[in-house]
Every structure is written in structure tokens, then in C-alpha cells.
Amino acid sequence: MLAAVLAAPGVAWGQDYKPDFNCSADHSKDSIATMLCQNSEAAKHELIFDQTYYALRQIVGKAGWKSLKQEVIADDGALKECVAPFSAEGVLQQTDPGCYIQKMDAITEKYKGRLSGSALEEASRPIDDHIALQKKLLTLGYLPAGSTADGVYGESTRQAIGAWKLNSGIPQVDDFISNSDAVSLASSDKVAKTEPKYSPFQKEVNVNGTIFKVAANCDSQENSCSNMSLTIKEGKKTTTLQLKSLDDLGTPDLSFDKPIFGSEDAVVYGSVYTGGAHCCVDSLLVFKNENKEWSVASLPEQDGGPSGGSPYKDLAGDGHHEIAVNDMRFDYKFDCYACSFPPMQIFEIRNNHLEDVSGDKRFHPFLEKEVQNAESSLVRGGPNMGFYAGITAIKAQEGNFLSYWDEKIKRNPDFNNLSSIDYCDAAGLPQKKCPPNGSDPLKFPNALAVFLYKTGYIDQYDLKYTGYSVREIDKSEYDRTHPINFFKYYIKIGIYKISTLHSYAPSLSDGIFYSVVFSVLFLIFLSFAFYFLPIFIAAKTKSQHFWLIVFVNVFFGWTFLGWLAALLMALMMDRDRQA
């Protein structure tokens, strides 16, 4: 019966399927995305996976969105087996649609095994019927005008299902479309009740006597809020802050916590899930600055859905709280989404400022685990540029950029012959500011060095060490970054070169190794001081034969007789004058 109803005029569906992302965007570096935009059958099977994924997502709730997202990303690693090995520079690796469909169907069945009841019935429905029911909700006015029936049952679709059930007198056990619900909806003529476009959103919390009140105007149809503000009342003092970075994105989710980061005052974490199958969360923190005034600091955009619980993590296991977000600037930069490994940016409030503390030594064990996770995902025989970019950034956070660069990037002949993104893409320059030749592809090590420098993972000394100069491409950038304190540069490189000697004696502890290094350097210093002792004496006594003594000491002092002659000259030649 359902099939007959959905086959009615105006509801028939063609066989041209598109994936759940925008194909008009640039996917030229992502072979899987390119294939999905070109192959309707493969896109259909991705939508069938979405059908199951979004049913399971509804079951786990907001608290489980992040872990479910991470699980899916891990399973998506199997799809990389469908990508052909690297063949030539500038040629996009091809993805086998048949292999993709087989792998995606296996992942779908894995997740479908965790469903039951009406959720399983919804996920098992033919994809054309699934899309047609969503379109029916749109036609009846339960979804905002202008929405697209794409088969993705996100929050707005779940709200629409609930509203339709309520309006139709159907028991609202859940927000899934069971088989019986599907028959009712397909023949339903219950249009949505007209509601005011905007409604006030308010939330008030009392934290140890401090009152926090959030206010906004929210559009229930568009699932977004505007004019968002936070009023904080402490005794007789009232402060009002505008949360502009969360406006017009979605319904806000705020937490009020004390103590966090060791602060004596409460810290407010606000976030908005912007929706979509692959993205994103915009968030901010509200806390007291060094002047004891409330201030707002935006966090980088995060991938995936909201955490649902506390956003704070104890990554070092030391009782302190941090907020860790994936650096989305690495997604799609050097490879496809599933072939990229963005490093974590770790933030905390320190000295009344929001600071990136990713490089703190206490996080090194956590960062090492991140490196191990990335290395376990490397594809044998593939260039793995997206993974190596992320690992190199993590090594920079640890303070081991130079050694990793020498070992894994500089000495890899494949990388030195592999073209990557152009200079302007690596430097984040818009096309109108791109200098001449800035659109020419760079070799991967050069592109990576520029990208890490522009994103703040390495400094100008690290950039110089990579051997890459932007002078011929962008002279203005070269003139800005070129002035380098060469004393600092060579001190840094010298310390690095000395530290590499530890690899020849790995059994020595750091303390013993550096004690030996210090002793050797001290002996070298004494040797040089002893060698140039005649010159020092001649300078101290202001000898009339100073330059003669320098000549003998420098050119003949390497022999015992030469050094002894210079010493005697420094001690004896000016004795008569001194007398």
C-alpha cells in the first residue's frame, strides 16, 4: 500500500542520487567525494548508510553523538582500500565504485544490527520511500520551506515527525517512522499548524549566588537563534555580553561550571551544532579576565556533533581541565577527509587568558597516543600526505619537529617528488592576494612547511631549517619573515644536533646523557681557553707585540713548540718595558 501511495503523481522519484554533501564545492583532491558526485549508484548506497546512521544517532542522543561519529570515521578507514595506488603527479587517484558499495553496505549492516523496533523499520525502508516520506513532511509544512528532501533525518526532520504525530493524534512513543506510521504519513492531509516564526529562548542558572541568564530570539522553523546575550548578575553588579559568534547557527547549548581550570569563578561554555552529516560545532567560553571583567573568547570550529556532556577533559590525568578540539584546517588540505588526521588543539584558561597549551610537556603521553593512532591508519603504498601532515604538526607540538622532519619528511624520496597544494592554498591567501606563480603546485615538503608556519605550528627558525624560501614567489612575505637572529637560529640548531647524538646511546637516561654532553662541552671550552692563553695574556698586559703573538699562537699553536713559543713571547717580550 505504501509503495502505491508513494508512486502517485508528483511523488515519483528518479534514479539520480547525490551524496549528503555539496558536490558544487571543490573536491578535486578527494577521490572518494569525486566518485560519489559522479556515480549515482554509489551515492545511493551512501544515503542508505545515512538512513541507518541517523536512526542510530537518534537513539544514542546528544551524549553519544561524538563517540558515534568517531566510530564511523574509524570504520570509514576501510573505504581507503577502494582508492587506487598513487600513479603520477597531478593525477587524482581513482576510487572503485563497486568496492565502495561493498564496503559501505558492510558498514551499514554493522550499524543496523544495533537497531530494533520502529528504528529498524525506518532504516530498512527502501531509500526512495525514505526520501518520499521526508518530502511529504515538507509538503505538509512540517519542514521549513526551501528545505531539501535528501534522505538525511537530522534534528529538524525528527522535530517534524514529532509535530506530525502530535497533530495527527498518533501516540508519540518516539520520533521514528515505523511501517504503520509510514502508511499513515503517505496518505495524510494533516498540514502543520502555523506557529509564530520567532519565540523567546531563555535559560537562567544560579551558580553559588552568581546568576547567569541567557536570552535570544529563536526561529523554530529554521532551528536557529539570533540576538543571543548573556546577562551575569553578581550582587549589585550586572554585566551583559553579546554572544554574536553563536548567532544564526542553531539552538544554543550552554553549561555553567565551577571550578574549571582552577578558576575561582564559574566558566560558561556555549556551543551551537550547525547540523549536517559531517559538521560542525561553534563554541565559546565566558570567563573573568585579568581585570576581573567578564570576557568572551571563541574556540575554533569543531568537527562532528556536540559532546552532550561536559566539554572539559583531563588529557594529562593530573586533575586539570582542558578543552581539546580537532584542528579542522587539516581536513581536506592535503588529502581526502578520511585520509586526513587533524591534530588536537588543547585550550585552557591560564592567567585569566584562554591559551593554546598543546605544547605543554604534561600532554606528551597523550600526543604520542595520537601519533600511534595516525600511524596505525597509514595506507601501505600510498603517499599518506594527510596523515603525515597531522603527525608532523603533533611532533611540532611536542617540540620534536626538526628530528621528525629529518627522519620522515626530508629523507623520504617519494615526498620530494610529489606535487601537492600551491603556495596560496598553503598560506591561506585568497585568490585576489595571490602573488605571481603562487598558484603553481609545490612539492609536498615545501607546501607542508609553509602551511605549518602559517598555522602557527612552527616558527621562522623551523621554516628556515626546512630549506624552503618563499622569496621568489612572495617577496613581501619573505621580507616579513626573513629577518632572523642568526645567533638564536644556530643555537637552536646546535642544541638539536647535539640532542640527536642520544640516539647512538639510547640506554643512557636523559640526565646521564646531558651530563656527559655538558662535561664534553666544558672540556672543549677549557681546551680552547688553554690554547688561546698566550693571546689572553698578551691582551691583558697590552703587549706591544700583540699581533705577533696572535700570529704565532693561531698559525703555529697547534704544535707544542709553537704554543710554547707564543706563551713565552707573551710572558717575556714586554718584561723590560714593564720594569
Image (cartoon, helix red, strand yellow):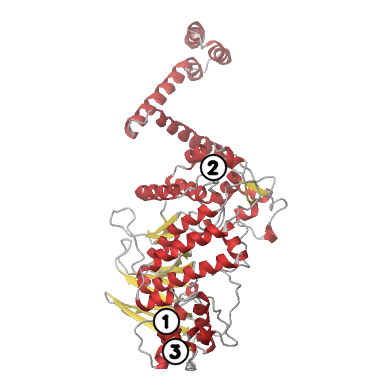
User: Looking at the image, is 192 positioned above or below residue 246?
Assistant: below
Mark number, residue 461: 2
- Residue at 59%, 57% (x, y): give it: 31
Residue corresponding to mark 3 = 184
Q: Is residue 295 left or right of residue 3?
A: left
**Total of numbered circles in the picture?**
3
Give the structural element (helix, strand or loop) at label 1.
Answer: loop
Q: Residue furthest left?
A: 208
Q: Nearer the viewer, mark 2 or mark 3?
A: 3
Cα–Cα gap, marks 2 and 1: 60 Å
Taking depth in this image into account, of 349 and 320 the one nearest to the observer is 320
Mark number, residue 177: 1
Q: Is residue 209 left or right of residue 447?
A: left
Taking depth in this image into account, of 230 and 76 the one nearest to the observer is 76
Mark number, residue 35: none
Q: Residue furthest right?
A: 436
Cα–Cα gap, marks 2 and 3: 68 Å
Q: Which amino acid type is shown beneath numbered disc 1?
A: Ile
Taking depth in this image into account, of 446 and 267 the one nearest to the observer is 446
Neighbourhood count class around disc 2 (C-alpha, 10 Å): few under 14, some 14–19, many 20 upward:
some
Q: Which amino acid type is shown beneath numbered disc 3?
A: Ser
